[in-house]
């Protein structure tokens, strides 16, 4: 019985963890990496400044100098796309981090406390969830005015309620496990139980949720941008770029299409990555629960 | 053997991924009307083998060689539709958990006759008549009306019998029973076993009975195949295997199986010390009702005493309040009334109110090794936490101490870096025990710690406990439903029935000369190896129940 050979479940687990990404996974990661590099080194890559009016001609077709043409007031679309990646990714990431932190903390707390605390928190959260996200965003931004901090805080807050539900459900499931009971029997406090006993067992599903939430938040902020309540000009952001250049659509300009395609590419890549991650989550959890 | 109903020839089944064989070169045959048992511990390949009789190979596995013939037809080469029409009609399956196999939202009767209707064997009214006949054969209470109930309205033992009725409804030639009584209490098991045995005889079906329990097998099977790591160790008539085992593995299995019979328990010899834990008049339960105590009472006016370096076993069936009592003592379930004293000092009700030293002195070890350890932590982290919390040990000192504790539970020092998923069930249970030991306790509450383990592994864990007690003077409160284990290990036994301790005393007295009617039934229900025990015990049980005023078994 003291055989030093690990059980087969362990071997499966390791195989599942070690297994390399599938072709779709590699594709998704490549797109995301590309955008992250663009965002990081944007100012060095962009031929022009995002606010510079470089040409008299608006909605110009792509040329050797202006790779993606110019926009409605003659700014370089290529440069604005690069600067836009910065704004869009940075605001999206920070907002997602806020949503996840807020949602996880509150969700775990509600699950571990249970009883009346959980009921009150969860019903309040249900009430918040019953408002369409975009409406909540519009109301808050209309009241506070649109600045990047307000935008980030609003998106983070609005999406925290969805994270809350997932985090609470994950913690509720773990709460019934005997190792939590064992921790309680040792006299561990709530903080220890949440951070050391529960959190490490939820990383994979939460990571999956993070990627999914990031794509939602980028879309949400782009929608706000499209409605004119997002990032304010002259700062470039993909959602606003689509709106600004709408009239170019008729003349076949690339100015509104390119940022829209960029948003689509990042959303699709994130979703592919999420599929990959959740398949892996299922694989690992499915096997160990056998 | 003249005719072979099921004929498994030189079958090897291997994992698709690793090509490691799960079953290697097994041959066995069942004649019509014969009951063959496959016995082995978990991981021996017995379920995989049993499922091949249904033409089913579990996902992730493949047949490397061999054939499985049912009445001459090769099941492994059959197409899906041929298999579908064969399953349920010619071969039927009874799973371990009937509760998971019944649809909770349909009436039982409809589910029992469903296979007959699906296969178009008989019209609904005829199927119902057949089901009624089966309910009688399986000695169901109120056979006329049981079909109109829903699964949650009958007990676990009844549901298990109803599942057998479902399997027998089409009159299959072969029944595959996979540990059908393992999840049941002993007092329930005996009735179910007897019903199975009678129904199989009356229906003239052959059966493949998969089990890990030698005594159960000896009562129901004509012949036994002993399987270990996918290889046949021995095959022969049940009594021959039990009385004169030839293969070394069969002998190990038999010696791990503590031969225990009523009247043969020796008086405990260990010396015990002064009172350590005193439980007086404890009542506890779930759901608070401010005026009348808990809504559901799990523990009712319980008195108990555990002396230093003694072992007190709490026995009783599931739902009798054994685990709740342990949780009350550990402070996880606050009692509604009553007091607990530890070495003369009154213990506060909850974990939060107890001092660190009080928490240290009583440790609890849980039943399921799989969920009692946090899968994200390494063994070193798990043990280190107890050391840091209760011993105030710094990080630098912990490494050596962890190795000492691992040695104490007979595990190699390099296990410190492993995570629970890399350990076997028995190893996990040793780590659970090690975590308790790291706190340097005086009393360890063991809640069914050997129930999830194979007999051989369980026996080695019990040996470990015995040694720890002798060397370190630890006291144990040992909760179990397995009377054989209690008989071999405990100084004192307390019998719990419906939340109350109905009998308490030295192990030999309680087991050899039980006084309470429930204890008598319980002690007499433990399966024994000798032939004909089942029928005799079932008869005695009827008489005991008739004379035991007020004792009602879950059935």
Image: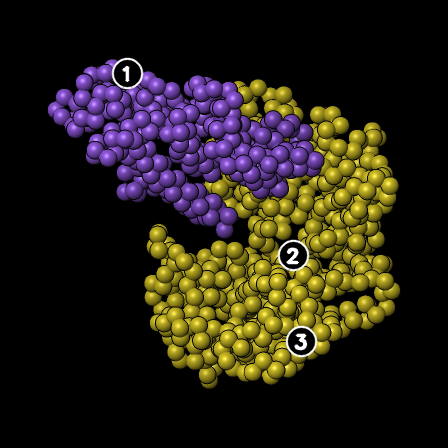
Chain colours: A purple, B yellow
The residue labelled by disc 1 is A51
Secondary structure of the residue carrying tag 1 is loop
Q: Residues within 10 Å of mark 2 (few under 14, many from 20)?
A: some
Tell me the distance, in whole angstroms, between the alpha carbons under discs 2 and 1.
Answer: 85 Å
- Asked if badge 1 and badge 3 are on a common chain, one would say no
In the rendered image, residue B183, in percent from the top left (x then y), is placed at 63, 58
Q: Residues within 10 Å of mark 1 (few under 14, many from 20)?
A: some
Q: Chain of mark 2?
A: B
In the rendered image, residue B144, in percent from the top left (x then y), is placed at 71, 77
Looking at the picture, tell me which residue is in the foreground, B306 or A56: A56
- In the rendered view, does A40 fall on the left or right side of A12? left
The residue labelled by disc 2 is B258
Q: Chain of mark 1?
A: A
Number of the label disc, if any, that sits on residue B124: none
Above or below — where is B212 with respect to B224?
above
List the single residue furthest toward the left. A64
Among the 4 quarters of the image, the one containing residue A280: top left
Q: Residue at x 74, y 35 (%)?
A: B331
Q: Residue at x 82, y 62 (%)?
A: B551
Observer able to see residue B243: no
In the rendered image, residue B314, in percent from the top left (x then y), is placed at 75, 48
- In the rendered view, does B251 fall on the left or right side of A240? right
The residue labelled by disc 3 is B135
């Amino acid at each position: 019985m003291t055989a030093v050979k690990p059980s087969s479940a362990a071997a499966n687990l390791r195989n599942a963890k070690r297994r390399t990404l599938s072709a779709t996974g590699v594709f998704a990661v490549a797109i995301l990496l590309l955008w992250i590099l663009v965002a990081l080194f944007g100012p060095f890559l962009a031929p022009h400044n995002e606010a510079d009016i470089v040409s008299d001609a608006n909605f110009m077709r792509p040329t050797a100098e202006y790779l993606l043409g110019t926009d409605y007031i003659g700014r370089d679309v290529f440069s604005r796309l690069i600067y836009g990646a910065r704004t869009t990714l940075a605001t999206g990431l920070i907002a997602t981090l806020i949503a996840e932190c807020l949602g996880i903390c509150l969700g775990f707390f509600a699950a571990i406390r249970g009883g009346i605390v959980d009921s009150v928190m969860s019903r309040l959260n249900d009430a918040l969830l019953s408002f369409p996200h975009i409406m909540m965003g519009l109301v808050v931004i209309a009241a506070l005015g649109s600045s990047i901090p307000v935008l980030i805080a609003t998106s983070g807050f609005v999406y925290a309620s969805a994270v809350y539900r997932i985090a609470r459900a994950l913690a509720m499931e773990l709460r019934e496990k005997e190792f939590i009971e064992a921790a309680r029997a040792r006299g561990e406090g709530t903080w220890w139980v949440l951070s050391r006993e529960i959190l490490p067992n939820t990383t994979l599903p939460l990571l999956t949720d993070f990627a999914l939430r990031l794509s939602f938040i980028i879309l949400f902020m782009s929608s706000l941008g499209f409605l004119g309540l997002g990032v304010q000009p002259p700062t470039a952001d993909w959602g606003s770029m689509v709106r600004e250049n709408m009239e170019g659509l008729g003349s076949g300009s690339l100015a509104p299409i390119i940022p829209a395609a960029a948003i689509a590419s990042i959303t699709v890549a994130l979703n592919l990555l999420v599929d990959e991650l959740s398949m892996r989550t299922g694989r690992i959890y499915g096997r160990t629960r056998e | 053997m003249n005719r072979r109903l099921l004929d498994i020839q030189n079958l090897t089944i291997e994992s698709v991924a690793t090509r490691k064989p799960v079953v290697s070169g097994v041959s066995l045959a069942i004649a019509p009307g014969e009951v063959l048992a496959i016995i082995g511990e978990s991981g021996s390949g017995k379920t995989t083998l049993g499922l091949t009789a249904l033409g089913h190979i579990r996902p992730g596995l493949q047949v490397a060689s061999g054939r499985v013939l049912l009445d001459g037809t090769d099941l492994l080469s059959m197409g899906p539709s041929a298999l579908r029409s064969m399953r349920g009609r010619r071969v039927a399956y009874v799973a371990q958990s009937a509760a998971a196999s019944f649809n909770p939202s349909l009436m039982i009767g409809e589910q029992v006759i469903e296979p007959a209707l699906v296969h178009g064997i008989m019209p609904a009214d005829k199927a119902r008549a057949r089901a009624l006949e089966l309910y009688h054969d399986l000695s169901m209470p109120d056979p006329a009306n049981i079909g109109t109930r829903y699964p949650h309205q009958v007990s676990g033992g009844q549901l298990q019998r109803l599942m057998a009725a479902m399997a027998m409804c089409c009159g299959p030639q072969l029944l595959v029973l996979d540990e059908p009584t393992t999840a049941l209490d002993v007092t329930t098991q005996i009735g179910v076993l007897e019903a199975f045995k009678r129904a199989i005889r009356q229906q003239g079906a052959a059966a493949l009975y998969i089990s890990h329990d030698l005594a159960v097998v000896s009562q129901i099977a004509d012949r036994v195949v002993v399987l270990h790591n996918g290889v046949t160790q021995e095959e022969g008539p049940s009594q021959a295997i039990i009385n004169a085992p030839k293969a070394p593995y069969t002998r190990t299995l038999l010696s791990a199986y503590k031969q225990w019979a009523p009247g043969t328990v020796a008086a405990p010899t260990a010396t015990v010390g002064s009172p350590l834990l005193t439980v007086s008049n404890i009542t506890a339960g779930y759901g608070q009702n401010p005026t009348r105590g808990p809504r559901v009472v799990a523990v009712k006016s319980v008195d108990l005493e555990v002396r230093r370096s003694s072992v007190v076993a709490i026995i009783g069936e599931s739902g009798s309040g054994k685990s709740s009592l342990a949780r009350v003592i550990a402070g996880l379930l606050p009692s509604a009334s009553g007091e607990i004293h530890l070495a003369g000092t009154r213990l506060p009700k909850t974990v939060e109110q107890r001092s660190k030293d009080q928490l240290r002195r009583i440790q609890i070890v849980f039943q399921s090794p799989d969920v009692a350890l946090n899968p994200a932590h390494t063994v070193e982290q798990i043990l280190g936490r107890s050391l840091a919390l209760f011993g105030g040990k710094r990080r630098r000192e912990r490494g050596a101490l962890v190795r000492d504790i691992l040695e104490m539970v007979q595990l190699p020092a390099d296990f410190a870096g492993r995570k629970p998923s890399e350990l076997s069930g028995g190893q996990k249970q040793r780590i659970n025990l090690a975590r308790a030991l790291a706190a340097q306790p005086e009393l360890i509450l063991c809640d069914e710690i050997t129930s999830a383990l194979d007999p051989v592994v369980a026996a080695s864990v019990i040996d470990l406990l015995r040694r720890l007690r002798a060397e370190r003077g630890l006291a144990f409160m040992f909760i179990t439903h397995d009377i054989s284990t209690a008989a071999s290990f405990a100084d004192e036994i307390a019998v719990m029935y419906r939340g109350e301790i109905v009998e308490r005393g030295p192990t030999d007295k309680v087991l050899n000369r039980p006084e309470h009617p429930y204890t008598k039934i319980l002690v007499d229900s433990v399966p024994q190896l000798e032939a004909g025990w089942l029928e005799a015990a079932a008869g005695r049980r009827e008489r005991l129940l008739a004379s035991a005023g007020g004792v009602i078994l879950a059935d």
